[in-house]
Image (cartoon, helix red, strand yellow):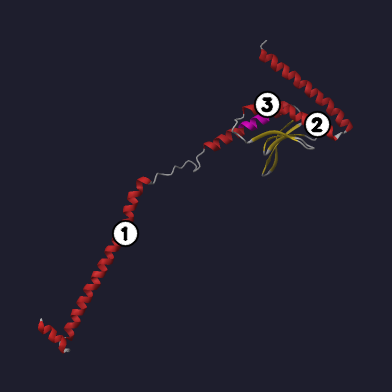
Amino acid sequence: MSDNTEKVIEQDNVRRLSAAIIEVKSARADKEDVVHEIRDLQRARLDMLKQELQDVIEDVPEDDETFDFAISSGTQPRFWIDAVAHVGIGRDRRSYRFVRETRAGRVVLAESENIEPISEAVTRYVAERIVERKRQLEEPVDGGNATPEPTANLPVVAAEAETPKRNRAGDALSGLALIVIGVLIGGGITLALLRDRVPEIETLFSLR
């Protein structure tokens, strides 16, 4: 028999003995209804679950700070997986209750008196969160729509921007020239009409 097999059998035996001790203490605590003993028993159950998940906890990437994996103290100890999910002990003081807080309220993900179903549910939850976090980190910030590089279009944009300015300048000069020509023509016509009436103007034309 290999060393790994012997190690697994030894761990199973230790776990069975720990579970048996907890059961005996739990029965006595229920009978005597001692609050601090009940709390200690709940914490002991959660410690067993944490030990069961130790390999999973160690496999979580070191840079992933999403998970807590910590047992809180208090009248009702809880094994926190992350900020919204935890495992507690049910009202019967024996069953594990894996729940998650959502916007719609508390959702029960798994519940059992046996440690294996809860361990599997927590493992799957951790795996889903890791995959979800990895997918979010790999998604582009702009949703996958690449922004075209604007540098190549700058000369074209500049040329297009200068064209209207040049057209406006040309139009202004043309308008001014027409006004000058109109003034000259109008002045000539006026002088021609006044030629016969004003002696000085007639003298001016005579000099020419």
Q: Quadrant of residue 187?
A: bottom left
Assess disc 1: are there few (<14), some (14-19) or many (≥20) residues with their C-alpha within 10 Å of its C-alpha: few
Looking at the image, residue 75 lies above or below residue 21: below
Q: Determine the main secondary structure of the stretch shown in magenta.
A: helix
* Amino acid at pointer 3: Gln
Is residue 154 shown left or right of residue 12?
left
* Residue 54 marker: 3
Element at label 3: helix
Element at label 1: helix
User: Circle 2 sits on which residue?
Assistant: 40
Q: Residue at x 84, y 32 (%)?
A: 37
> Where is the C terminus found, in terms of image quarters?
bottom left
Frontmost residue, 155 versus 92: 155
Element at label 2: helix
Q: Which residues are magenta?
A: 120-127
Alpha carbon distance from label 3 to label 1: 73 Å
Farthest top residue in view:
1
Spot occupied by residue 114 in the image (x, y as percentages of width and height): 75, 27
Assess disc 2: are there few (<14), some (14-19) or many (≥20) residues with their C-alpha within 10 Å of its C-alpha: some
The reply to whether discs 3 and 1 touch (Cβ–Cβ < 8 Å) is: no
Q: Is residue 32 magenta?
A: no
Whichever of callouts 3 and 2 sits on the residue coming sooner in the sequence is 2
Spot occupied by residue 193 in the image (x, y as percentages of width and height): 18, 84
* Amino acid at pointer 2: Asp
User: Circle 1 sits on which residue?
Assistant: 164
Alpha carbon distance from label 3 to label 2: 21 Å
Alpha carbon distance from label 2 to label 1: 84 Å
* Amino acid at pointer 1: Pro
Assess disc 3: are there few (<14), some (14-19) or many (≥20) residues with their C-alpha within 10 Å of its C-alpha: few
